[in-house]
Amino acid sequence: MSEETPVWKALNLAMDAEMSDDDSVFTLGEDVGLYGGSYRVTQDLYARYGEWRVRDTPISEGSFTGLAVGAAMVGMRPVVEIMTVNFALLALDAIINMAAKIPFMSGGQFPMPLVVRMPGGVAKQLAAQHSQRLEHTLMNVPGLRIAVPATPQDAWWQLRQAIRSDEPIVFLEHELLYFSKGTLDTKLPPPPMHRATVRRPGNDLTIISYSHMAKLSLKAAERLSAEGMDIEVIDLRSLRPIDWDSCAASVEKTHHLLVVEEDCGFAGAGAEIVATLTERCFHFLDAPAQRLAGLDMPTPYNGTLETASIPTTASIADAARQMLLPGEIS
Amino acid sequence: MKRDTLLSMLHDMLLARAFEERAAQEYTKGNIAGFLHLYPGEEAVAVGVLHGAEPNDYIVSTYREHVHALVRGVPAEKVMAELFGRRDGCSGGMGGSMHLFDHERRFMGGYGIVGETYPVAIGIGYSIAMQELPEAVICFFGDGAVNQGTFHESLNMAALWKLPVLFVCENNRYQIGTEIHRHSAVTEVYKRACGYRIPSEKVNGMDVLAVHQATLSALQRIREGTGPQFLEVETYRFRGHSMSDPGSYRPNVEVQAFKDEDPVTVVLEESIPNYPTESQLDALGRDNIAHLTGHMRREGYLEMEDVAHMKDEIARLVDSAVNFALNSPEPDMQDAWQALNCNRGQEVVI
């Protein structure tokens, strides 16, 4: 067991392990090779596996993602790195029209063992074109899976599971989590890739979140614990499919649901989660389920405004207090 | 060239024509729905190119791909059943006319979004190059597709890494209703490949032998490891873009000129009892099926009875394909879920 591994290193180790185990695994993207990857995820792999398996590409997101689709059709296991989720908009044809649909349109003749990794989220004043979240778009695509690891442990296993899977998987990494450290125990057996996990058990209110916001939700829950509120925090780990059973079990226990997402609230992941759990658990709820989400605006460059445009530990704690102590908080 | 090869090419061209004309009839009857893009006039391209391919090569095609599939060896009944949306279609009824797939024959799909064939082809090519296999990929696209970004992105990567891909532009001069001079600043498509240092050649797409010869040479160079090759094949579609397109944007004189030269109506249907002389055949000019029959007749490979016999046989084959399609069951929703989750293995996902 190694203590205090950063997420980027866990991903790097996962890549290395899979490339070492299986010759059909290769990775490609901008600066993944000689440079070592923008967030170090492919560090040292170029020297170890050579240029054909760690391929630096031209700036051609649409076609190098499509290239991976073609390679996956003939049995390779490509791992595409799109430098940031924002550039994935140029690759959506390959992801949505091709990767997600070819297995289906071919009547099941062509599996699609493809992973498309992409860092994203609001980081530190990168402005509107470099601070997007794309899960709302990708969640609505049948045929795709979406993994959203938040810890080194999940990053390690979920990436390995994604590479071994025959389904096309979008692997959303959060830029603020790369250097976040945690325990990595490579001997610990993994839960199924899409299984949600209870980060903190509690009885008063369920917070459902994912990625960086799961981390902030956990912090908020710890603060509230000091105030006598017992919050359960669920980290979804997967946005497609969603582990509804785990979510419903928690809501049926706490009778309160708050969904926290960094993405814009309108028609986002939170809308889906609240809608489905309201349908499923309506009679268990003591109060209307709530969403706390990013504002419906492109991310401002200004640091103060940027912070105010997405949930923070403080705003998550406030939202939970509002639900549990209505009227007592202004 | 061997007699068998020529006869086989003629057979495929006649099959292509008969299959597509029958598909049009079945569409009118309501047995085929959706978009239906037909190939009459362009037969020499698919036939000339694909008769040059080896069984272990891969084919990536567009939405006008019935004939590519047929020539590749996908049974006519499986193609027709797919057009009918039936369970025994080559894509299980999930793809339809624009999405024919056949894993066994390395027919890697028809793609409905213009410009998608390039990245799929270079991806397969990348896999071949990485494993140093003696295989190649044939990538079809139309003249309208060369203005997509993926064309430039993919040609660049193919050349950069010397991928074994033969790019074949089926230049039928129209991007649906927009003539090439109105959609491309440079109308000689083959010249565009020069920007990526890819050897390219313009070929007469009405001459199946010319197409075949150019393909063999290009594939030979690919197998020698020189990297991608590019053919611009000049052709013409006798019909509109799809069944919903009357083609009214094309000048009457142009359309009439080609219709007058239709090989099926002129040569094979009307003239079989009195097969035309060589000079009459030559006068047919750009008619691609006539071009081949004329050549074979000059070479002494072909008699009138051969054509009549072949034509009868093809008519029976197409009839039986239609009957097969009509008798094939509709897929049910369980088939659809299975197709979607074909790659999920035993994992139970809630």
Image (spheres, coloured by chain):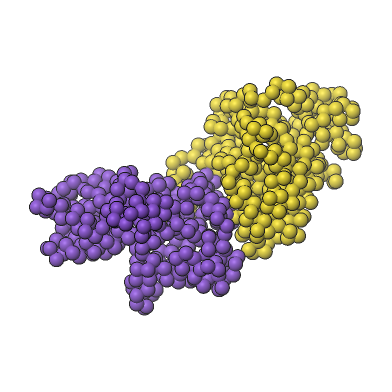
Name the side, left or right, on which B94 lies relative to B197: left
Let me know if residue A151 appears in the view. yes
Q: Residue at x 71, y 60 (%)?
A: B134
The extreme front residue here reads: A302
Q: Is residue B91 above or below residue A302?
A: above
How many marks can you see? 0
**Image location (x, y in percent) of residue B344:** 45, 55
Let me know if residue A153 appears in the view. no
Q: Residue at x 73, y 60 (%)?
A: B225
**Image location (x, y in percent) of residue A305:** 29, 53
**Image location (x, y in percent) of residue A124:** 36, 60
**Image location (x, y in percent) of residue B136:** 69, 55
Q: Is residue B6 above or below residue A204?
A: above
Q: Quadrant of residue B110?
A: top right
Q: Residue at x 43, y 64 (%)?
A: A159
Q: Is residue B187 above or below residue B340?
A: above
Name the side, left or right, on which A43 lies relative to B154: left
Name the side, left or right, on which B215 lies relative to B75: right
Residue in front for this viewpoint, A31 or A182: A31
Residue in front for this viewpoint, A221 or A33: A33
Q: Which chain is yellow?
A: B
Name the side, left or right, on which B163 lies relative to A44: right
Q: Colour of chain A?
A: purple
Q: Residue at x 72, y 44 (%)?
A: B190
